[in-house]
Image (cartoon, rainbow, N blue to C red):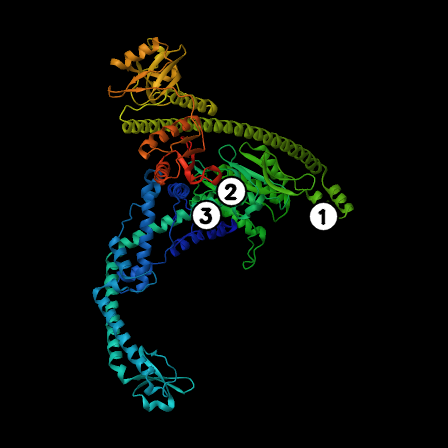
């Protein structure tokens, strides 16, 4: 594989700890090993694939709860089976479990279809082997034991063994329990030695029980003897056990041969599993560090927004870096322990993690195509080679200069250090100039003023500094691009309580030009820090205001949406309650009419009261009447845009989803007969159905001429009998039916209950007397079956006792 960076570079970037975290999320030994040995690739096509697979795995885990199942290492076992060698039961079961886990993972990915194209392509070589998995799992359980159902012969042999064991145990137990051998038996138990049932016999009574001695206790006082009575049974059991082992060996050989024949495909399927497991591990690491999928571009750039060094955990401070076409080189300066090296490693890890298919711990990241990453970070002095720090750095710089080109990322810590400052700075500037000539992307740290001036005077070079608190001189570990950093040598010396006279003398020894430079730089830095803080504070305030505005807008939208949904649902429930209640009234009226031998009668007072009650419920709930709603029954347009309505016209009341007949046009609204009710409905709530024909229309038109308010005759649905609408002023809360038969009392009680429902009367008192008790029991049974009656009971002593039934009414809309 074409490596992006050598192992020495990965070591100084602390990449080993990234590998450990990666490996810790795997579910297979081979996946674990590959994660620990992962190497960033310079193959950008492979990088795109790996990064994309990680993103798809994160999507699957988030949207579908996708996960991997842990498996054992089966590579060696599969290779052994391929050579024709029989495997152990545990090895075979591990192979079956691995294949089942791989099949489950691939199935989950294929079900996601177009959401995960890269993972689906990764699964292309996979071919399920159910014949292998099913055959092994049918024969071997999870613990690696061969099951009876593995073969008919094995089941038969084991039944024989069980029978022989029972026989041998029973015969030995009979000897132990026998009074004849009571004094010879040490303990009244049957035990096993060498797979044969024996009894414990006192050594001094050995001759009393004939048999074979298989063992002796540690004290020598007890002999474990196989009685002659059990010898034949034990021999038969042992023979069957030998047959059992032979049959098991045959089964394992057969299963191993099956694995051997499919060894090539099994290896492919396990490879697919390992690739998926690695992608899933990368996805989990990305989720743990709240990483972002880097945007991959062909240009050699590294752009990171609020990136955090993964290994610093909660101590990590977000840093932003931009190495691109405009800024090809960053010269980072500032005090020691301020985070310069952390910034170098952040950039190096972003590129190397991306090259391994991982996501970057940042708010946003853009990573380009590099063919190599070169590092010179930390003290690489080799004592064994008697080389100084400076010579070690020179050797490494020479290697980097030779390798540098426009696809090289170079990270150098303290360039030019370790020797006389002026000479080291001059050498550093010359090296950096060569890197620019080659087109490399470079990030270097320094304390040298010469390098800061170099950064300020070149169009493709930018200075950067690590931020510090101007009052405490504590580092904040944040990177500021655009201005060089101060070394703060004298300020830190004072803070560390070095003698003030010594510090003053040092400042005096410093050249005036250097002092002026440091002083001007300090003033600029402090001003920049103040401006940055003010800018950040303003940005936070603006963000807070935007957040408040967004929250208010979202809350308003949510409340509006909930109000509309509530109104819609309440409207639908109310309409459904109306339909059910109206149907129940009509049904009960029809039943009462049939029993009375005449057409059913519903009072006009009941109908009007119900209509007014439901209209009031609409108003109380603030429910819309939905005049704009178009129903699904093919009704005509709104009546407002058509010719005037006349009595007898058929219309559809959209708010109630009911059909009715026009009684009277009231101007802005219309009086409509809907079943047993009359409703006053706005015209915008009506759609035309047609004109009623025959006697129905004529009767309604005549009723309208007569005032439309008196009792009317309404044709029944089939055009036959008529239903009289009678006016009833009120309903009583009790009724007396004493002296009547049940068939006479029932319709009276039923109508009384209907009236009480309309007027909202409850509880009610039904006086039926005691007599024979038949009338009371019959009426109580009737009441208990009534859909709007509840809590039926005989009256208390002060309510009339057993001659009275008291009950309550259930709300028709409950």
Above or below, 225 relative to 337: below
735 and 146: which is toward the camera:
735
Image location of residue 763, percent across then percent down = 45, 33
Q: Is residue 515 left or right of residue 133?
A: right
Quarter of the figure with the C terminus: top left
Q: Which residue is mark 3?
A: 5
153 and 477: which is toward the camera:
153
Mark nearest the camera among 3 and 1 is 1
- Tag 2 near tag 3, CB within 8 Å: no
178 and 353: which is toward the camera:
178
How far apart marks 2 and 1 lie (CA) works out to 32 Å
Q: Which residue is mark 2?
A: 347
**Image quarter of residue 522:** top right
Label 2 secondary element: helix
Above or below, 116 relative to 166: above
Q: Is residue 759 left or right of residue 449?
A: left
How far apart marks 2 and 3 lie (CA) works out to 13 Å
Question: How busy is the neighbourhood of tag 1: few (under 14 within 10 Å), some, or many (20 plus)?
Answer: few
Label 1 secondary element: loop
- Residue 431: mark in rendering: none
**Image quarter of residue 529:** top right
Mark nearest the camera among 2 and 3 is 2
Image location of residue 781, percent across then percent down = 35, 39
Which residue sits at x=26%, y=67%? 248
Image location of residue 327, percent across then percent down = 52, 34
Q: Which residue is mark 1?
A: 496
């Amino acid at each position: 594989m074409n490596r992006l960076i050598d192992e020495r570079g990965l070591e100084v970037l602390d990449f080993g700890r990234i590998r450990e975290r990666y490996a810790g999320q795997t579910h297979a030994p081979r996946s674990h090993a590959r994660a620990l040995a992962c190497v960033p690739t310079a193959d950008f096509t492979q990088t795109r694939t790996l990064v994309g697979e990680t993103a798809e795995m994160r999507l699957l885990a988030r949207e579908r709860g996708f996960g991997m199942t842990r498996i054992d290492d089966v590579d060696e076992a599969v290779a052994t089976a391929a050579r024709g060698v029989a495997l152990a039961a545990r090895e075979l079961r591990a192979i079956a479990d691995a294949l089942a886990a791989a099949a489950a993972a691939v199935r989950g990915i294929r079900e996601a279809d177009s959401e995960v194209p890269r993972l689906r392509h990764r699964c292309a070589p996979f071919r399920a082997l159910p014949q292998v998995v099913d055959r092994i799992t049918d024969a071997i359980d999870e613990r690696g034991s061969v099951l009876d159902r593995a073969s008919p012969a094995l089941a038969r042999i084991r039944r024989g063994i069980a029978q022989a064991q029972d026989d041998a145990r029973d015969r030995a137990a009979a000897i132990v329990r026998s009074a004849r051998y009571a004094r010879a038996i040490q303990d009244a138990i049957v035990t096993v030695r060498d797979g044969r049932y024996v009894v414990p016999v006192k050594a001094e009574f050995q001759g009393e029980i004939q048999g074979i001695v298989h063992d002796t206790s540690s004290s020598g006082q007890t002999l474990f003897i196989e009685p002659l009575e059990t010898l034949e049974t034990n021999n038969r059991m042992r023979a069957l056990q030998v047959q059992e082992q032979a049959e098991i060996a045959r089964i394992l050989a057969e299963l191993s041969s099956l694995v051997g024949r499919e060894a090539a495909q099994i290896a492919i399927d396990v490879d697919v599993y390992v690739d998926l497991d690695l992608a899933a591990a990368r996805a989990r690491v990305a989720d743990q560090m709240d990483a972002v999928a880097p945007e991959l571009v062909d240009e050699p750039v590294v752009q990171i927004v609020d990136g955090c060094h993964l290994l610093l955990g909660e101590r990590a401070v977000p840093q932003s870096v931009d190495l691109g076409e405009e800024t090809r080189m960053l010269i980072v300066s500032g005090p020691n322990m301020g985070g310069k090296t952390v910034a170098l490693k952040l950039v190096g890890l972003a590129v190397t993690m991306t090259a391994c298919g991982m996501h970057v711990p940042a708010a946003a990241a853009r990573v380009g195509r590099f063919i190599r990453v070169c590092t010179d970070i930390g003290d690489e002095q080799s004592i064994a080679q008697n080389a100084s720090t400076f010579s070690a750095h020179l050797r490494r710089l020479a290697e980097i200069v030779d390798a540098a080109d426009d696809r090289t990322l170079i990270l150098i810590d303290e360039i030019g250090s370790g020797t006389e400052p002026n000479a080291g700075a001059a050498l550093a500037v010359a090296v950096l100039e060569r890197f620019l000539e080659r087109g490399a992307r470079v990030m270097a740290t320094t304390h040298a003023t010469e390098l800061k001036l170099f950064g300020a005077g070149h169009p493709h070079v930018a200075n950067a500094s690590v931020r510090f608190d101007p009052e405490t001189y504590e580092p904040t570990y944040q990177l500021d691009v655009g201005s060089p950093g101060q070394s703060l040598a004298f300020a830190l010396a004072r803070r560390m309580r070095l003698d003030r006279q010594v510090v003053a003398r040092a400042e005096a020894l410093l050249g005036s030009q250097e002092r002026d430079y440091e002083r001007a730089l300090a003033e600029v830095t402090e001003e920049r820090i103040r401006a940055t803080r003010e800018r950040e504070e303003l940005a936070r305030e603006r963000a807070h205001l935007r957040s408040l505005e967004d929250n208010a807008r979202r809350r308003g939208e949510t409340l509006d949406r909930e109000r509309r949904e509530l109104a819609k649902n309440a409207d639908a429930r109310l309409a459904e309650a109306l339909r059910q209640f109206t149907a129940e009234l009509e049904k009960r009226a029809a039943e009462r009419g049939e029993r009375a031998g005449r057409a059913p009668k519903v009072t006009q007072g009941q109908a009007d009261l119900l209509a007014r009650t439901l209209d009031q419920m609409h108003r109380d709930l603030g429910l819309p009447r939905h005049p704009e709603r178009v129903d699904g029954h093919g009704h005509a347009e709104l009546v407002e845009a058509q010719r005037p309505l006349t009595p007898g016209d058929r219309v559809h009341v959209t708010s109630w989803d009911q059909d009715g007949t026009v009684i009277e046009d009231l101007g802005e609204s219309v009086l409509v007969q809907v079943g047993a009710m009359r409703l006053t409905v706005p015209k915008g709530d009506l759609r035309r159905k047609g004109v009623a024909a025959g006697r129905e229309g004529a009767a309604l038109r005549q009723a309208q001429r007569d005032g439309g308010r008196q009792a009317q005759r309404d044709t029944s649905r089939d055009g036959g009998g008529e239903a009289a609408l009678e006016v009833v002023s009120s309903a009583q809360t009790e009724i007396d039916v004493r002296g009547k038969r049940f068939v006479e009392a029932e319709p009276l009680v039923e109508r009384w209950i209907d009236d009480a429902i309309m007027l909202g009367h409850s509880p009610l008192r039904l006086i039926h007397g005691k007599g024979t008790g038949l009338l009371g029991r019959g009426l109580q049974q009737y009441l208990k079956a009534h859909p709007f009656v509840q809590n039926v009971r005989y009256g208390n002593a002060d309510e009339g006792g057993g001659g009275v039934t008291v009950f309550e009414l259930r709300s028709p809309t409950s």
